[in-house]
Amino acid sequence: MEEEELKNIVEEPLAEYLPTRQAGLPTGQAGGRYTYADYLTWQMDEMVELIKGKIFKQAAAPRVNHQRVARKIITAFSNFLKGKKCEAFIAPFDVRLPIISKRNEDIDTVVQPDICVICDPSKIDELGCVGAPDLVVEILSPGNNKKELQNKYEVYEESGVKEYWIIHPNECTVIINTLINGKYQASRIFTHGDKVASQAVEGFVLDLEEVFDDMI
């Protein structure tokens, strides 16, 4: 393969995760794993995420129920957080989860949570967030369930995200994973008629009857 063709492949990752050799990508540094420094060089029409150095394509455009749930929850957080130090963000918004250091070359996980709340202003810069948000909300969509339930669960737990909410919009359910002694403990399944309170964002309560009242 010509050098220029090789360069183009490195700079333009194409598919959802495949083992590097199977995808036809060069092994490169750290056994073919990519970093945030690589991520910044890519010019992509579609959003991608890096999870432990592996490339994951985002699922297709969110469906109606996903959009409705996201809109209602970000509105609830935004209204509650007015005048407070915490701030809520909605995707697309890069969250870098450094393990070794904050250097771009050392960061191998860059995710775009549907919603995140950050209470430490020093973690926010012009590119997004560097470090663990206090709370993350992921809304399941066809095609992304494994990524949210397994891959992201692991990196959120390892990086110290205090609360990880998993919402299934079609089933109208919420599970809250709370970080206790470095491990997530799951709540019961919440649904219509429940009000859920956050421990990471003190005082915030979400009425699920309002969130799920117009699902189709």
Image (spheres, rainbow, N blue to C red):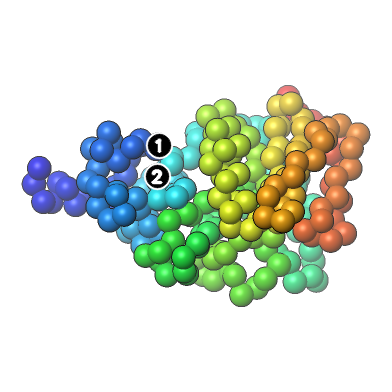
- Camera-side residue of 197 and 41: 197
The residue identified by callout 1 is: 16
Q: Residue shown at 69%/60% (left/top)?
A: 134
- Camera-side residue of 33 and 40: 33
Instruction: Looking at this view, name the residue that lies furthest to the front.
Output: 181
State the image coordinates of residue 61 (x, y, percent, origin top left): 53, 36
The relative height of residue 190 versus residue 154 in the rendered view (above or below) is above
Q: Residue shown at 89%/42% (left/top)?
A: 195
Which circle's residue, 2 or 1, is located before the other in the chain? 1
Q: Residues within 10 Å of mark 2 (few under 14, many from 20)?
A: many
The relative height of residue 188 versus residue 205 in the rendered view (above or below) is above
Give the distance between the C-alpha atoms of the residues marked 2 and 1, in whole angstroms: 6 Å
Q: Secondary structure at mark 2?
A: strand
The residue identified by callout 2 is: 55
In this rendering, would 110 be left or right of 181?
left
Q: On the rendered image, what quadrant is the C terminus found in? A: top right
Q: On the rendered image, what quadrant is the N terminus found in? A: top left
